[in-house]
Image (cartoon, rainbow, N blue to C red):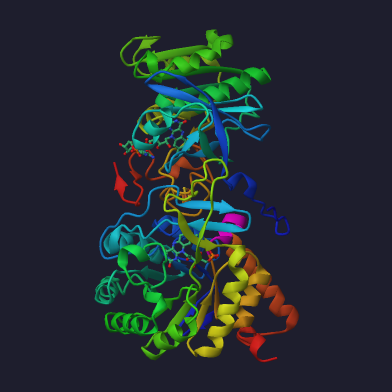
Amino acid sequence: MKRNNTGYIVNIDNKIEKSYKLVEIAGNTAQKTLYFRIGKRDISPGNFFMLNYNCAQKPFSVSGYDGDVVGFTIQDRGECSQKMINAKAGEYFGLTGPLGNNFDLSKSKNALLIGGGIGSAPIKFLAETLVKKNINFSAFFGARSVDFLKYLFDLDKKRDRIKYYTDDGTYGAKGFVTDDLDEALRTGNFDAICLCGPEKMMVKAIEIVGGRIKNIQISMERYMKCGVGLCGSCVLDDISARVCEDGPVFSYFDTIVNCREFGKYHRDGLGIIEN
Amino acid sequence: MSIKFGNTVFLRNGVLASGILGVTGYSMLKVAEDGAGGVTCKSISKIERKGHPTPVVQVFNSGVINAVGLSSTGVERTTSELKILKDKSDAVVIASIFAGTVEEFGETASMIDENICDMIEVNISCPNVADEFGLPFASDPKISGEITRVAKNSTKLPVIIKLSPNYPNICEVAKSCEANGADGITAINTLGPGMLIDVHTYKPKLSNKKGGVSGPAIFPVALRIVYDLYKAIKIPIIGMGGVTEAEDAIQMIAAGATLYGVGTGILYKGTSIFKNINAALDNYLAEKKMKYEELIGIAHRI
Ligand SMILES: Cc1cc2nc3c(=O)[nH]c(=O)nc-3n(C[C@H](O)[C@H](O)[C@H](O)COP(=O)(O)OP(=O)(O)OC[C@H]3O[C@@H](n4cnc5c(N)ncnc54)[C@H](O)[C@@H]3O)c2cc1C
Ligand SMILES: Cc1cc2nc3c(=O)[nH]c(=O)nc-3n(C[C@H](O)[C@H](O)[C@H](O)COP(=O)(O)O)c2cc1C
Ligand code: FES
């Protein structure tokens, strides 16, 4: 149902769950990418879907989309994610989406993309989109070990502009994804930064950037019960923004800079503050 | 414009329904800043309580079904969230409470801070946990009256009772609440329960299988109930259920509601729905050269 007589148009179709067959599941024990043939939809990097499998539902960012098949890369983190990565091709998942907003690099000529942990999933999709559009970028990806990075290796074409970091040195440089950031900013001529990953990593990155780049876009993660802007479980303190509906991508300097909980705390499913 | 609801003054005539964006202080504050005159928090219990596992909300063509369940962070934590709303806005702060026994309604009402909250809404109608608690209070006029009295005796704040549309004796329930001192009625809670089934797995789309129906689909039922209640009782009514635009709010008020409420409407129109409805309502009254008070219940007088 679409209503446009009052100016505020919400695409309700995207908020109605439909089920799709899992056409392929690939990856290793660290994480798997789940593919669904959903046909032609308006999906941009940063968008997410609510995935519902066997009575468990959580939000997952799109990690790839070719105009027909959509992929989600899921890391084993707990009950729901574990169930999902053990699913078999041919099984059905309920998908609600695409939801949320997206990274916007329409004004950028050369962006630096930084992904940490499973936060690299939407950054990978963003990088692929930039490759298609022939827009310049560099990307840094960091993870615990090589097993957590393998799904990114499809980005072959732009290998020269991509750097990998692992905590244990099993691939790329040993260390943190922010280790070369200062140097990169001095020499790279970047006009935008897109970040997704653990908040501690994003805080560190923003600290290193200082005020050198004004266009910083970050993708936030909060506990989501509904994903459609009603339940209130994902609202950020002080800025009153719903991560599911007003985000998940926010401008750092326009909004997150005033968000008291950024890098400090989040809430659990009940709404109780956790550090 | 300001409207008197019993002895409570609302500066704007829309109320945020319980359970929608009502967990954190800043979330509720945003809705007040976007034009709600009253803001209701998600129903709270004495102590912390878990709700149902996800999926708990499913959208369908003309509304939503939900089985969020009565999850609650407890009175204490929610009070500190409500304080943010109280300190930073001029909206009427409404604490929605629920409990498992008649006595517990009293204990919970007595825990609501009278300096932070302006009104208590007693949720006797949530269908989700009926199984767990045994009796659905809202189905029984006598028990609903008892709860009203116990709550009234436990607080100085005005007490309004939120009714369920799922029992045909809703007017009797309302009368019993009125006779026991209720200061107002909120109608309606979700309709149902309802269900949605996946067409490939044949499993229910909610983990709880069934859930309460809200949004445009239930508007005509909500309107009819407000109309019937206006005839049955004298205390004021907050009319909610499927309001998504000014014409819906006008109908609610014409049927007898003193204030209109919005929950699921936010899915369609965002939180600015209150601002937009209020502006359209002002224009409407100006065009009709009518006072707000004249519109209340007008459908009964012509
Ligand atoms: C917009 C968005 C996009 C996401 N995209 C992806 C994705 O592409 N791939 C992916 O694998 N996951 C993604 N997630 C995370 C995913 O939704 C689940 O939260 C995650 O899989 C854990 O769920 P679980 O049930 O398996 O674990 P749970 O049993 O719920 O939790 C496991 C552990 O994770 C912690 N945790 C859960 N939620 C949060 C949170 N919001 N912030 C901090 N810690 C938390 C818990 O405290 C617990 O220690 C995304 C989340 C959001 C909000
Ligand atoms: C997600 C959701 C959660 C709700 N939680 C509560 C609740 O905790 N307490 C309550 O009294 N009503 C609750 N309700 C019911 C609403 O307050 C309201 O009565 C009902 O949805 C009808 O209004 P609407 O169509 O404008 O949403 C909830 C409704 C929804 C959609
Ligand atoms: S997840 Fe429910 S409002 Fe964002």
**Which residue sits furthest right?**
B287
Q: In this view of the protein, which residue sits in the foreground, B162 or B184?
A: B162
B258 in relation to A188, above or below? below
The percent coordinates of residue B17 (x first, y second) are 48, 66
B100 in relation to B286, above or below? above
Residue beneath the point at 35% across and 51% down: A271
**Does residue A197 show up magenta in the picture?**
no
Residue range highlighted in magenta: B263-269
Residue beneath the point at 28% across and 82% down: B150
Residue beneath the point at 66% across and 54% down: A8
Looking at the image, residue A238 sits to the left or right of residue B262; the answer is left
Q: Confirm whether residue A185 shows in the render.
A: no
The percent coordinates of residue A88 (x first, y second) are 46, 27
Looking at the image, residue A140 sits to the left or right of residue B103; the answer is right
**Does residue B268 show up magenta in the picture?**
yes
Q: In this view of the protein, which residue sits in the foreground, B220 or B115?
A: B220
Looking at the image, residue B253 sits to the left or right of residue B116; the answer is right
Q: In this view of the protein, which residue sits in the foreground, B156 or A70?
A: A70
Q: Confirm whether residue A85 shows in the render.
A: yes
